Amino acid sequence: MKIRKKYLFYLLAFSSAIITSVNAGFDVIVGKFFIPNVWALGLSIFVVGIPVTLFMGLFFSIKLKGKSLGARIIDPSFQRLRLITKQEIIPQIIAAFGNSINTVGYFALLSLFKDPSIVLPFSQIVILYIVAVESINEKDMPTLSEIQSILIVTFGAILGSISLSGDINVTAMLIVFFVINPGWMLLSIYQRKLKWMKINDSSNDSVNIRFWNVLFSCIMTIIIIHSFDLFYGSQNLLAGFQASYEQFIPALIISIGSFFGLVLYIRALGIGKASVVQAVRSSTIIFSIPISLILSYFSIIDPFPIDPTLLLMKFIGISIMVLGILSFSLNLVKAYIFVTIKPGYPIEETMHKIWNIRGVTRVTATAGTYDFIVKIRTRTLVKGYEKIIRKIQNIDAIDKFKWESVLKEWEDI
């Protein structure tokens, strides 16, 4: 089945957001009634997640009419569960480190607030970090409108972090800015690198990426918790393994939700930029509110206070944060430039000059009417078109070129 790439992207990102919001509700329930130790809860999710993800991978590897179930249901690139390749090891280690510190920080924050509608907005500030990294890696500096959006997101997060008692939790802010969001940034950036890799001449798939990430993340989390135990003389590592056995079913439910939520997220990373994926996925802020209301109705979390001033401040904070984040998704422009070069000029040197232009993500030499096909990804059409065209015109080797903006793309669902 074919679907427009744009619609598939939003379908994946929104589905991931919904699953994440529901899973956050289960996180609260498990943390309150089954595994109150934050460190033990974080470790148990990974320990139980390994057999869960392994089973999922093996199940989706089953062939049906020459095609795996995973390729039909989850990711068309998935063929079977396989061993990790050498080129994947370093990105997986970095992504796993980010995942482990993000998970521990997330559950620490959840233990402070208990409310998913308060915790999930914090994790969306990661877009500030992702945009900064993309500006360096993808040669596309933020525009003035993007800087404004960044400031809107930041101030919205500060308003959203105000507790309903009227205080700003400094500990929570430190966890957000120095633990959760840097960790999620590493996870997003390097999982996107993994998704764009070619493994055995075919696209990498989200199921294998998720399986090996869970395995490496579990190892990283064990190292972090063991170091913490040695420093403070605690027994969190042992508590984590005990919780994995004694509270297997609650941890199993969270692990299954995490599997599907992150597999869909990784697929979305394979279609769009990490910042745009995160912008759409920020809809968890909206989906988490009914989850919190349900938890409050059953007295699992504290009931919502009725102070209209504080509620209005939180509503304004979350609203402007959503607007600031979503504004990023409206700026991305993709295009192709078809280039013909003059006879006698070196091809490799010309390719290098084109590659150094900001906004260029790929340069391909072709046989036929055009010598090069240049792929462009930029955040604003006016900025991208004017600056890129000016740079192209300044390259003496180029005879003529043609710019074609991408309007629609299709992909297997």
Image: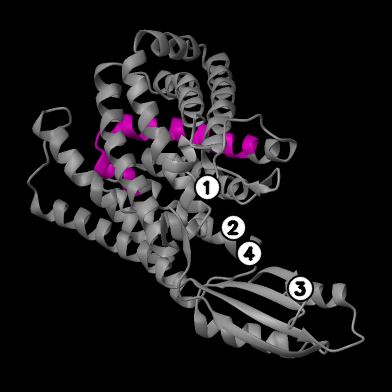
Q: Which amino acid does label 3 sit on?
A: Thr
339 and 311: which one is in front? 339
- The residue that label 4 is drawn on is 138
Q: Nearer the viewer, mark 4 or mark 3?
A: 3
Q: Which amino acid does label 2 sit on?
A: Val
Task: State left or right for residue 333 relative to residue 125.
Answer: right
- Please check the rendered image and state whether residue 108 is part of the magenta-colored stretch, yes or no: yes
Q: What residue type is labelled 4?
A: Glu
Q: Are marks 2 and 3 in contact (CB under 8 Å)?
A: no
Spot occupied by residue 285 in the image (x, y as percentages of width and height): 28, 50
Label 1: how many Cα within 10 Å (few below 14, some 14–19, many 20+): many
Q: Nearer the viewer, mark 2 or mark 1?
A: 1
Label 2: how many Cα within 10 Å (few below 14, some 14–19, many 20+): some
Label 4: how many Cα within 10 Å (few below 14, some 14–19, many 20+): some
Spot occupied by residue 143 in the image (x, y as percentages of width and height): 51, 75
- The residue that label 1 is drawn on is 188
SS type, badge 4: loop
Point out the tag, 3 or 1, that comes first from the N-terminus: 1
Whether residue 156 appears in this view of the structure is: yes
Q: Nearer the viewer, mark 4 or mark 2?
A: 4
- The residue that label 2 is drawn on is 133
Q: Which residue is drawn at 16% across and 52% down?
A: 310
Compared with 64, 205 (above or below) is below
Q: Residue at x 59, y 65 (%)?
A: 135
Q: Which of marks 2 and 3 is in front?
A: 3
- The residue that label 3 is drawn on is 366
SS type, badge 1: helix
Spot occupied by residue 400 in the image (x, y as percentages of width and height): 73, 91
Q: Residue at x 56, y 35 (%)?
A: 208
- Which span is picked out in magenta? 92-121
